[in-house]
Amino acid sequence: MATTVLISKADFSAANLVKFSQNIEEDQLQPFVYAAQEYDLEPRIGDDLYNDLMAYAETPDGSRPELLAFLNKEVKRFLVLTAYRRFMAAHGLNITQFGLTKTADPQGTFNQAEAQERAVILRQVDSDSNVALGKMLSVTWSFDGVTYAKDKKQSQPSSSIRAPKRSIGLGTYRGNPYKDLI
């Protein structure tokens, strides 16, 4: 897992792409940022560019202004949206010894969002992150004299995982059910 983060909680508000509460602790958000970097960003931009972005983010010395501009303009936008999507899908849910639970408001001042309401937000964020991905992949990857190769697989838009459709096979058994039991 990456130890360097390319975005922080401050980037969520600064980008003005998503509604985000400043009351959420940084450590609650970081696992989703790490996952977005490793599972959404790295496969899209490739190892070389990803490693250079990570190395430069650790020690930004001003020697790569074009790479920094790409990070600030394209990469951060994509990461904010994908990390937010990951965060929103799990926010308010807790894994306990009793299973998956959701937080209840002790004073009864608000209700948790329903799954359908959350799904609307997640679909919109998916759409926005696909646009951000398209913009990030459309620029020429030549920064400060270094050119990075693009792979055709990287340009495919991301999508949510959906359960496979069930097929119902009615009337397909042709044997004797009593004979086959013995």
Image (cartoon, rainbow, N blue to C red):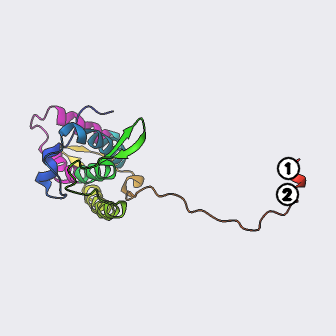
Camera-side residue of 98 and 68: 98
Relative height, residue 175 to residue 68 (above, below): below
Relative height, residue 139 to residue 39 (above, below): below
Q: Does the magenta stretch include residue 8?
A: no
Relative height, residue 144 to residue 108 (above, below): above
Q: Is mark 2 on a helix, strand or loop?
A: loop
Residue located 40% across and 55% down the image: 152
Camera-side residue of 133 and 110: 110
Residue 72: x and y, percent? 15, 49
Label 2 Cα neighbours within 10 Å, binned few <14 / some 14-19 / many ≥20: few
| CA separation in Å, label 2 and label 1 | 7 Å
Horizontal side of residue 173 vs 176, given as left or right: left
Q: Is residue 68 visible?
A: no
Q: The disc labelled 1 sits on which kind of residue?
A: Leu
Q: Quadrant of residue 53?
A: top left
Which residue carries the number 1 mark? 181
Camera-side residue of 157 and 88: 88
Residue located 18% across and 32% down the image: 58
Residue 34: x and y, percent? 29, 39
Q: What element carries label 1?
A: helix
Marks 2/1 in contact by CB < 8 Å: the verdict is yes
Give the residues in magenta. 48-77
Q: Is residue 39 visible?
A: yes
